[in-house]
Amino acid sequence: MKSMKKVVSVVLTAAMVMAFAAGCGANGTDKETNGSSDTIKIGGIGPLTGAAAIYGQDVKGGAEIAVKEINEAGGINGYQIELNFQDDEHDAEKSVNAYNNLKDWGMLALLGTVTSTPCIAVGEVAHTDDMFLLTPSGTAVDCVKYDNAFRVCFSDPTQGVESAKYIGENGLAKKVAVIYDSSDVYSSGIYEAFAGEAKNQNIEIVAAEAFTGESNTDFSVQLQKAKEGGAELVFLPFYYSQAALVLQQAAGMEFSPIFFGCDGMDGILGVDGFDANLANNLMFLSPFTPTSTDPLVQKFVEKFEEAYGHTPNQFAADAYDGVYALKAAMEKADVKPDMKPSDVCDALKKAMVEIEMEGVTAKKLTWSADGEPSKEAMIVKIANGDYAVAE
């Protein structure tokens, strides 16, 4: 009887060990290998709910279209892509939690995060793990502070510098006011770079007025100071939701300078209850406009509208190009599903600086070792309630 009990105990113990091992392999919880997976697992992180959801949802949509196209064409190195996109609600702590979930799932590379503050937080743990990170839209400098991190979009300083150059070189204004969010790294970073380049362009900043995330609904004081300073142009380096309020309040006080923003302005025409006529002649820097006649852009826009029922913004375009950049780099590096994430990371760091691709955000897109993309800036001007490339 004792012998029988001993045999049963040994069998049960062995079964438990085997079940545990099988469970680790299936879920990819071993950070050093992806087990028996036959797909290339790419993670995504961004706000699918909350105030910044429009960005995360469009990034997810753009990425999904690229993944579908690539899989239908045979995948990457003969393997299908599996995309797992997690919601972080534009919250750094939740973003790190999402990253850990994806790492346990068996992620080989990360497309994300979407917004800058969560991206910086995730970047720290991704660097520690030696996980490759390509953010489609994280613009803060520190989003790509480590050699395992690259971005598709322009950085904050680049946006500030290019905006000042365009204004100066095209003679749009000599006297400029700036309204910016001092509590947001995106907004304040662009403002600082803009102010530095404005001096080179002989632009006088007649007012530089800040607001914070807790005081972002009433801009009457900032607009009044801009008006009193004789501003011919008001630079708005922040997101479209607040910009819509600025335009409404400026119209109410009969102040009509040129308004100029950055990529966060994309989406202003979709604000509920906003009179699109107030945005006529608004200009902003962006790598993408859905009204472009480029065949690749039009194909992407058509597919996105069919799938999601609205026109894609530039964040969707950045994500679409981001997935294709991962494809090009993974093919260059001969990435396979059973590789360790750290080995994939080392291979992609080398491959990213060797690839060149055409995308919907640029005819020619390359990367340098510091993680920054090389592509031409585009200025979009709203006319007749739609987006168009400024001439």
Image: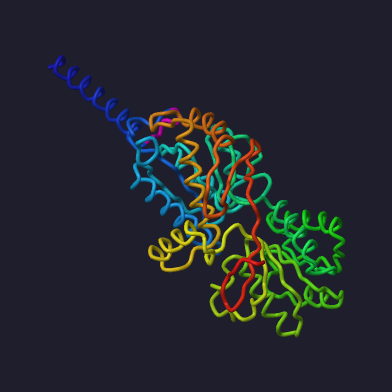
Q: Is residue 12 magenta?
A: no
Does 312 sit left or right of 338 as displayed? right
Q: Measured from the top left, where is residue 259 in percent x and y?
A: 72, 72
Q: Measured from the top left, where is residue 50 in percent x and y?
A: 52, 63
Please count the marks in the image. 0
Can you say which quadrant of the picture contains the N terminus?
top left
Q: Measured from the top left, where is residue 67 in percent x and y?
A: 40, 48
Q: Nearer the viewer, residue 347 or 240?
A: 347
Q: Residue at x 77, y 65 (%)?
A: 170
* Residue that sits furthest to the top in the current view: 3
Figure quadrant of residue 379: bottom right
Q: Nearer the viewer, residue 54 or 368?
A: 368
Provide the residue span drawn in magenta. 28-32
Q: Measured from the top left, where is residue 133 in percent x and y?
A: 54, 41
* Residue that sits furthest to the left in the current view: 1
| Up/down of 311 relative to 200, above or below | below
| Up/down of 313 relative to 66, above or below | below
Does 57 sit left or right of 390 as displayed? left
Report the coloring of the rendering.
rainbow
Q: Which secondary structure class fits the magenta region best?
A: loop
Q: Nearer the viewer, residue 1 or 363?
A: 363
Can you say which quadrant of the picture contains the C terminus?
bottom right
Q: Residue at x 57, y 77 (%)?
A: 385
Q: Residue at x 27, y 26 (%)?
A: 18
